[in-house]
């Protein structure tokens, strides 16, 4: 059995795929930036810890929300802790983001995907008070290549073929088919 470097750990890689070099997390990649895929319909690409950020509108939105969340929390922590170094602010912000990603995954997403019986069978439910304290650093988090290329891809079937943009009062602006999503810049300039 072959194992790959992708793990089952909920690590926030969509935000933190790059080493931190001080400052807030980065905004969209400049034209011609190395994260833009060759053959893209536009030179404007988004930058995130995950190279798939510019592939699909749902991913773009999710990555954007998490990067903005990180930067907002870092700003607040910096304001209330002016004596903290940039690295300390970054690491504390990352802990908060990781915690929220894990909470959303275990409280909102997995119960819908797996159902209550499987959640209970594998003890995946969140504890009511305190926190989970059974972490075992000896467990290898690598996943089998066969799982990664087959079962782990179930999320691809969840990608919507259309999406609705709404104005600030939640009224639909337009319903766009996925082919427009190949040029994600349209999502930000089209009214």
Image (tube, rainbow, N blue to C red):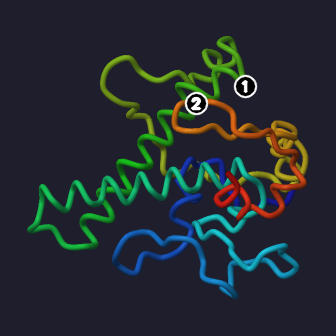
- The residue identified by callout 2 is 170
Residue 71 x %, y %? 37, 60
Q: Nearer the viewer, residue 172 or 60?
A: 172
Q: Nearer the viewer, residue 79 or 114?
A: 79
Q: Nearer the viewer, residue 138 or 73?
A: 73
Disc on res. 113: 1
Neighbour tally class for label 1: few under 14, some 14-19, many 20 plus, Cα within 10 Å: few
Nearest-to-viewer mark from 1 and 2? 2
Q: Is residue 138 left or right of residue 89?
A: right
Q: Nearer the viewer, residue 26 or 138?
A: 26
Q: Quadrant of the N terminus?
A: bottom right
Please tell me which residue is depicted at 50% across the width and 42% down the height of the picture: 101
Please tell me which residue is depicted at 58% across the width and 66% down the height of the picture: 49
Query: Which comes sooner in the sequence, label 1 or label 2?
Result: 1
Disc on res. 141: none
Q: Is residue 92 left or right of residue 132?
A: left
SS for callout 2: loop
Residue 111 x %, y %? 63, 21
Q: Is residue 138 left or right of residue 59?
A: left
Q: Is residue 155 left or right of residue 85?
A: right
Residue 110 x %, y %? 64, 28
Relative to 23, say whether 89 is above or below.
above
């Amino acid at each position: 059995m072959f194992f790959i470097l992708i793990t089952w750990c909920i690590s926030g890689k969509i935000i933190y795929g790059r080493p931190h070099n001080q400052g807030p997390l980065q905004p969209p990649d400049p034209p011609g930036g190395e994260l833009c895929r060759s053959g893209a319909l536009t030179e404007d690409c988004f930058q995130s810890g995950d190279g798939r950020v510019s592939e699909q509108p749902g991913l773009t939105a999710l990555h954007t929300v998490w990067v903005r969340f990180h930067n907002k929390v870092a700003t607040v922590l910096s304001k209330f802790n002016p004596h903290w170094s940039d690295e300390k602010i970054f690491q504390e912000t990352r802990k908060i983001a990781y915690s929220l990603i894990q909470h959303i995954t275990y409280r909102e997403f997995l119960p819908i995907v797996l159902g209550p019986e499987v959640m209970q069978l594998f003890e995946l439910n969140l504890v009511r008070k305190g926190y989970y304290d059974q972490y075992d650093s000896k467990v290898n988090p690598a996943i089998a290549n066969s799982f990664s290329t087959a079962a782990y891809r179930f999320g691809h079937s969840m990608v919507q073929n259309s999406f609705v943009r709404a104005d600030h009062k939640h009224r639909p602006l337009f319903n766009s088919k996925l082919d427009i999503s190949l040029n994600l810049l349209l999502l930000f300039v089209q009214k």
